[in-house]
Amino acid sequence: MPVNDVSVPPVAIPQSADSLVPHIPGVIFQFYRSHSGHMNFPYLEGGGIALAYVDRQQLAKDASLLLEQLTGSDHPKVMSAIERSARWMLPLNTRFRLPFPKEKPHWIAVSANPEPIESGVRWNGLMLDITDQVIEEQRLRKLCDTDPLTSLPNRRKLMVQLTHLTSLSTRHGTPLSIMMIDIDHFKQLNDRWGHLQGDSVLKQLATVTQSLLRCEDMVARLGGEEFMVVLPLTSLQQCHKLADRLRQTIAEHDFGMGQGNVTLSIGVAEYRCGEPMVSLIERADRALYSAKDVGRDCVCLLP
Ligand SMILES: Nc1nc2c(ncn2[C@@H]2O[C@H](COP(=O)(O)OP(=O)(O)OP(=O)(O)O)[C@@H](O)[C@H]2O)c(=O)[nH]1
């Protein structure tokens, strides 16, 4: 049969976009800000859940009813995105959490184009509920940043955090110390007790170390049997003391293999304001190797 003989069932063509708008999974809006700062939504229509709990008639008069619901950093973030878009006539692209009664807030993405008018600026744009996408992003980010065996932050996450903390330390002149930790003769432990028992030691070490730290400290697994602890606002002496407490706690801990089976060598170092982060890590690494050299089960620091 020739292709052009295939009969197509008749479909009603919408007369205007207006009849489609209530059925789309998002919101089409017009947002207005006067030169004096008054804001409102002259137009706000659409489908999906995003409009379920907003009072459109009120928002047509005053947008601050919606903006005031934004929590945490979302309010200043959205306000400065509006300001930037208005000042430079750049597209407004941002996201925020919209509170929902009896539910977790939903993530809403906004994308709109500004248009200068005599009395202020007008934006025409879209809002989409991106909650599922944000949850997936958060899950993937956690996966990228976490060591699967111990659930500790991994090397990647640690480097990001250490970069941030060294720059804070340089800016404010505050102390920052690190510990480089390595389990002694871990190969022998694996060979003698098996890989599963080795894994269990790594997990228990992670838990014991975390229990000795404050919430602003961080312990990460760098790989294999090597860990790093980062201690903001901590001098070398305080770090040394804590490292020795950790060493002793682990030496006395019952890993289920009889006492005295697991010991740690630890190198400690303090950040020198302005130095590259790698120099700090190298110093702690060299201190760790000194600890290995002098017989293990000890804490070393370099001058
Ligand atoms: N069970 C277990 N073992 C691991 C894991 N990652 C690395 N290892 C083992 O850790 C051992 C590290 O051995 P080495 O680097 O020789 O160090 P060591 O035996 O601890 O010796 P020193 O550091 O000099 O005291 C190797 O046998 C690796 O196979 C892991 O995730 N689980």
Image (spheres, grey):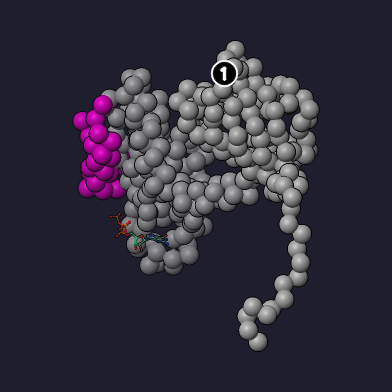
Confirm whether the magenta stretch covers residue 289: yes
Q: Name the quadrant of the N terminus.
A: bottom right
Above or below, comparing residue 271 to residue 174 in the picture: below
State the image coordinates of residue 201 (x, y, percent, origin top left).
Answer: 46, 55
What segment carries the magenta color? 274-303
Which quarter of the frame holds ligand 1?
bottom left
Above or below, comparing residue 300 to residue 82 in the picture: below
State the image coordinates of residue 146 (x, y, percent, origin top left).
Answer: 47, 50
Which residue is the extreme one toward the top? Answer: 36
State the image coordinates of residue 46 (x, y, percent, origin top left).
Answer: 72, 42
User: Which quadrant of the structure image shows residue 37?
Assistant: top right
Residue corresponding to mark 1: 118
User: Which quadrant of the structure image shows residue 100?
Assistant: top right
Q: Residue at x 58, y 46 (%)?
A: 134
Q: Nearer the viewer, residue 141 or 214?
A: 141
User: Which quadrant of the structure image shows residue 5?
Assistant: bottom right
Q: Residue at x 76, y 67 (%)?
A: 10
Q: Nearer the viewer, residue 221 or 132?
A: 132
Confirm whether the magenta stretch covers residue 283: yes
Q: Residue at x 63, y 49 (%)?
A: 132
Does dot 1 land on a helix, a strand or a loop? loop
Whether residue 252 appears in this view of the structure is no
